[in-house]
Image (tube, rainbow, N blue to C red):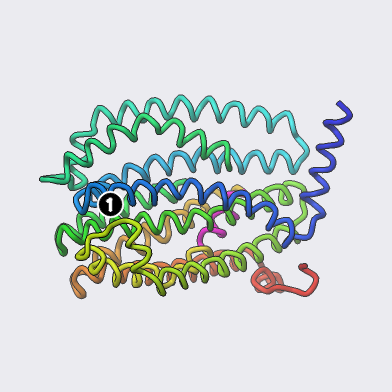
Amino acid sequence: MNGRKKAEKDNRKFMLETPIPKLLTKMSVPMMIAMTVNGLYYLADAAFVGNTVGVNGVAALAVGFPVDMFILSVALMCALGTASMLSLELGKGRYHEASNVLKNAILFTAGLSVLLSIAIFIFKHRLLLFLGADGDIYPHADHYYSVIVPGFILVLLSFLLTNSIRAEGKAKLAAIVNISIKYHGAPLDLSVFGIINRVLVFITMPVNGIGQGVQAIVGYNYGAGSINRVKKALRFGYLYSLIFGGLLFFLLFGFPEKVISLFTNDGSLMLAGTGPLRISTFLVPLIGIQVVTYFYYIAVQDVFKCLVTSVCRHIFFLIPLVLILPYFCGVSGIWQAFPVADLIAAGFCIMLIRSNFNGSHQMEILTLNDDDA
C-alpha cells in the first residue's frame, strides 16, 4: 500500500512540477508513436490494394472511407472522453474513481463495437451502393469490408487503451466529396481522393499524439488548479504541432510523386494525383492548431467549444467549400477547398482560445515567455 501511495505521489509531482516542454515531450512522443502505428494501417492497406488490385481497388477504399471514419469517430469518442475524465480525476487525486471510469469504459466500448459491426453487416450492400460503389468498384469494396468489419472491436479497444466527433465530421466530408467528384470529376479522381484521404489520415495521427499529450497535461493540471501550467501546455502544443506540420509540408510538397508511388505504379494515377496532393496539403501545418485546441477543450470539459472545434474545419468550412468551389474551378476546386479550410479553421480556433482570456491574459497564451522552459 505504501508503495502504491509513493508511486501516486511521484506521478503527481511529475505531472505538476516537471517543466512543460520536457513534460510535453515525454507525454507526446509515445502517443505520437502509437498514433503513427495506427495511421500506418491506412497507408499499408491502400498501398497493398493499389499495387495488387489497381485503380478500382483504390477507388473502393475511397468509397468505404466514410465507414472507416465513422468507426474511428466512435473509437475516439470513447477514448478521448475516457481520457478526459481520467486526467481530471487523477489531477484531483481521486484514484479509485479513475479506476472505475476505465473499467466502465472498456465494457461499454466492447459492447458498442459488437453492435456496430452487426449493424454494418446487415446494411452493407445498401451502404456501399449509396457511397458510390457501382460497376467494377462494388466487388472490391464488398470483399474489403467483409474482412475489415469483424475487426472493429479491436480498433475501438486499441484507441481506448492507447489514449470524437471530429472524425465523424471527416466521415460526412468523405459521403460529400465522393458525390462531388462523381458530379464534377471522373472515376480516376475518386482514386486520387482515395490516396489523399489515406495520406491526410496518416499525417494527422502524429499531430493527434501531440494533442493527446496536451490533453493529459492540461486535464491533470486543470484538475489540480495549476492554471499557469495549463496555459504553457497549450502554447507549447501549438509550437510543437507547427514544427511537426512544417516537416510534413516539406515531404508532401517536395516529393509528391514518391508519396503516391507507395500506393500505385499506375502512371495515369500518379500523374493525376501529384497536383491535387500538393494543393490539398499546402497548409497542412495549420491542422495542428485545430487539433491542439480541440484536445484542450476536451481536457477542460468545455462541451460546447469542444463540439465547435471538432467540426469547424470539416462541417463549417470544408464541406461548403467542397460544394461551392467546383462550380467555379471544376474538380480542382475540391482540392483547393482543403488549404482554404485549414486557414479559416486555424484562425477561428485562435480567436476562440483568445476569447477565453480577458485583459492581460488574452495574448499571454499565444506568447512564449523566457521562464516557460
Placement of 120 over or under 299, stated as above or below = above
Q: Residues within 10 Å of mark 1 (few under 14, many from 20)?
A: some
Q: In the rendered view, does 130 fall on the left or right side of 90? A: left
Q: Which amino acid type is shown beneath numbered disc 1?
A: Asn
Task: Name the residue beneath numbered marker 1.
Answer: 51
Placement of 253 over or under 36, stated as above or below = below
Identity of the residue furthest to the left in this view: 135
Residue 285: x %, y % from top left: 49, 69
Element assignment for label 1: helix
Residue 117: x %, y % from top left: 35, 29
Q: Quadrant of residue 318?
A: bottom left
Residue 54: x %, y % from top left: 22, 51
Q: Work out which quarter of the rendered image holds the N terminus and state it.
A: top right
Q: Nearer the viewer, residue 168 or 246?
A: 246
Placement of 34 over or under 245, stated as above or below = above
> Is-magenta flag for residue 160?
no
Asked if residue 266 shows in the view, the reply is yes
Q: Which residues are magenta?
A: 290-300
